[in-house]
Amino acid sequence: MKRRTVMLSALGAVGGLAALVVGWGVLPARSRLGSPDLMLPTAGDVALNGWIKIAADGSVVLAMPRSEMGQGVHTALAMLVAEELDLPLQRVRLEQAGADTIYGNVAMLVGSLPFHPLESEGGNKPTKVRVGEWMVGKIARELGIIVTGGSSSVADAWDPVRTAAATARASLLGAAAAQWKLPVQELRVVEGLVSHPSGVSAHYGALAAAAAGTAPGTFTLKDRKDWKLIGKKAPRSDIPAKTNGSAQFGLDVRLPGMLYAQVRQCPMLGGSVASLDAKAALAMAGVEKLVALDAMGGSTAGFAVVGKTTWHARQAALAVDVKWQQRAQGALDSQQIENQLLAALDGKSGDTFFEKGSVSKAQADAKRVIEATYSAPYLAHATMEPMNCTAQVKDGKVEIWVPTQVPEMARAIAAKVAGVPANQVTLHVTLLGGGFGRRLDVDFVAQAVRVAMECQGKPVQLGWSREEDTTHDFYRPLHVAKLRATVDAQGGISSLSIQSAGDAISPRWLERGLPALAGPMDMPDKTTAEGLFDLPYGFANQHMAHVATRMGVPVGFWRSVGHSHNAFFSESFIDELAFETQQDPVAFRTALLKDAPRYLAVLQLAADKAQWGKPLPAGRARGVALHESFGSIVAEVAEVSLLGGKPRVHRVVCAVDCGTVVNPDTVAQQMESAVIFGLTAALYGKIDIKDGVVQQTSFPNYPMVMLAEAPVVETWIVPSTRSPGGVGEPGVPPLAPAVANALFVLTKKRARQLPLVA
């Protein structure tokens, strides 16, 4: 923590960053191997570094710093370890990692840099890219922020986890060679058993004690040609527990003497309690107390009622007679906000994220201009498991059980609320019943600890109803964009300019969870313009800018973040340009991708597998979209019809280049998940705010795509030797534009606003 404090102070000081760069210039990257004492000491286990322990039976324990929310990361990281240690996957167990900086997510922070992906590829990166990635990587290693997000878990673990396993293997083999007085190069490992042709053998558990404390002079990561697990289908390690009911999500936590709390917050966003009368509620059977809740961690003020069961607490919370008052700045209204954003497109230039050539000259010489304005609404996360946290405050210590994507931020807010040092907070990360970015915030953790402080040392499980969860989210921002292209005298597209407007997420999130970074990191937010400034198409003249706003609605990261709506803007407009220039949408994109072979290969694979150009049954049409996000490229072809005037998506063909694939099954599962998630948003997703109150409350008026509406999803993977890219989010952005583009073929009407079904 001292190192982090020094870092943040230096970042905030004038010239501090330059001084850090000069000072670090002679230093190698901080090792993420870690010392054995970082691993939880358990009887019979021997830690070899900060990631790997060897059990007495020869199995392996991996320190797990990433949260499992259905994306398969616990299986993927275990596969990396099993591969390097030549061990069956089922013999790798997981243990929650501690708070050390070696577990920080470096890849996620480096991925936040606003560089064009075509600049960041290959070995000939521009100086600004190399320096930027080097500098942010250094900072990320020092800060060591433990976070699961940005589709970065495997990308971040790719080097440190494999290295930890490979060095552990080298130490174990070195110990065997020393004990047996044999050359180490003559030893072989099969399924965790070290042996020599002479007949001597031992499993890892028998060698661990001798290997402890040794540092191998050299180690070698396995050659790709020798992989036995990576790239092969493997069963998810979390499925058995989830099917037999033994898996522990946040709401599954049960402790002796536990109480239950239910929250009610002011229905007007940013509002507060004017007065309340709880006498009748507190007189109800099974009710313990009422605890007032100030706005904490970005939450809205309200109260929680504590009872002997969830039912007692919920009924009493509803029985409290409360009068709410609007925020001092006045009521929020989503329609007014959209109007203000549209006005901002004409009144402000914004921050330029990318420019190439001269758009102004192309516009002056243009034969005609094609222009369109697009918009996308606020969206809620609607995780299947609403927000919850179990907390116990006793004897100056805090213990919490919480489904979170940011364990150290959860620990920090718990310590702050309880007024104890962070090292007096014990945190248990449960499985997450959906994250999608919502659990990157810790408002519900602050509330749980505040309530537990009033419960005389008893543990209390605080939960939100579905209605509270929907109406007090950190929403995907409402964004608008104006896209303009020029057509030259030869009928070709001579320029593309995009200006968007909407709230920036990262500064608001930093203010809530990492306020020490909010000032030093106050700069244009990549998430506002990603999916617009970083297009792969070879237009000669381009200009991409964003007007960052602060409208007052609480906003947060939502699965695929800015890409989720910006891809709808950009890929729908690309289709418009194809139509306006009388070209086939795939052929039009193909001509613009001659300098982007990875993108072209993905597009062609999707088109081929979807049989693009082959006639469909009457009443059906195909739409295509191509998009890069989180280091991966996805093309989707949607086959759509109209049923009762509403879109029906029958089939979605996905092609993906996500670099090296660890588990192909997981890639397919995540593409399927992304299609359903993206289709839900495309057809139904919209949060309306009137008089400061969110109008949607639960699934009846904020619906999901049901099983009967789910399309067939096919996933095709482009082989690659690149390091892994993201998988959890990249399948979401192309879905909405692919469906919208198919609808245009059917209706000859261009949908420029989400959702596609009012």
Image (spheres, rainbow, N blue to C red):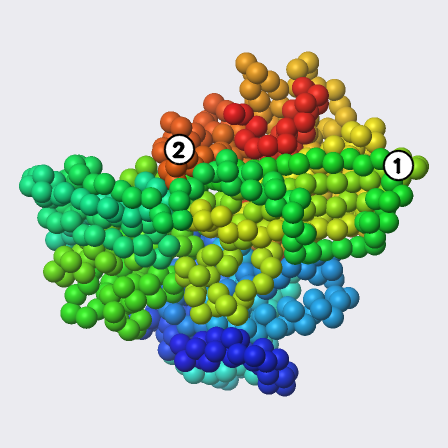
Separation of residues labelled 1 and 2 (CA atoms): 46 Å
In front here: 96 or 623?
623
| Residue 367 circle label | 1
User: What is the three-letter code of the residue carrying label 2?
Assistant: Gln
Relative vertical location of residue 697 with respect to residue 247 in this rendering, above or below: above
Relative vertical location of residue 615 with respect to residue 196 in this rendering, above or below: above
Relative vertical location of residue 656 with respect to residue 444 in this rendering, above or below: above
Q: Residue at position x 28%, y 73% from top? A: 421
| Residue 714 circle label | none
Q: Secondary structure at mark 2?
A: loop
In front here: 131 or 231?
131
Q: Which residue is mark 2?
A: 696
Within-10-Å neighbours for mark 2: few <14, some 14–19, many 20+: some
Q: Where residue 306 sits in the image (x, y, percent)?
A: 16, 48
The image quadrant of residue 441 is bottom left
Give the position of the N terminus as an image quadrant: bottom left
Q: Where residue 208 sits in the image (x, y, percent)?
A: 40, 75
Q: Upstream in the sequence, badge 1 or badge 2? A: 1
User: What is the three-letter code of the residue carrying label 1?
Assistant: Lys
Q: Where residue 747 sits in the image (x, y, percent)?
A: 67, 19
Q: Residue at position x 87%, y 40% from top? A: 366
Q: Secondary structure at mark 1?
A: loop
Does residue 732 show up?
A: no
Q: Residue at position x 74%, y 32% from top? A: 576
Q: Residue at position x 56%, y 47% from top? A: 502
In front here: 511 or 756?
511
The image quadrant of residue 667 is top right
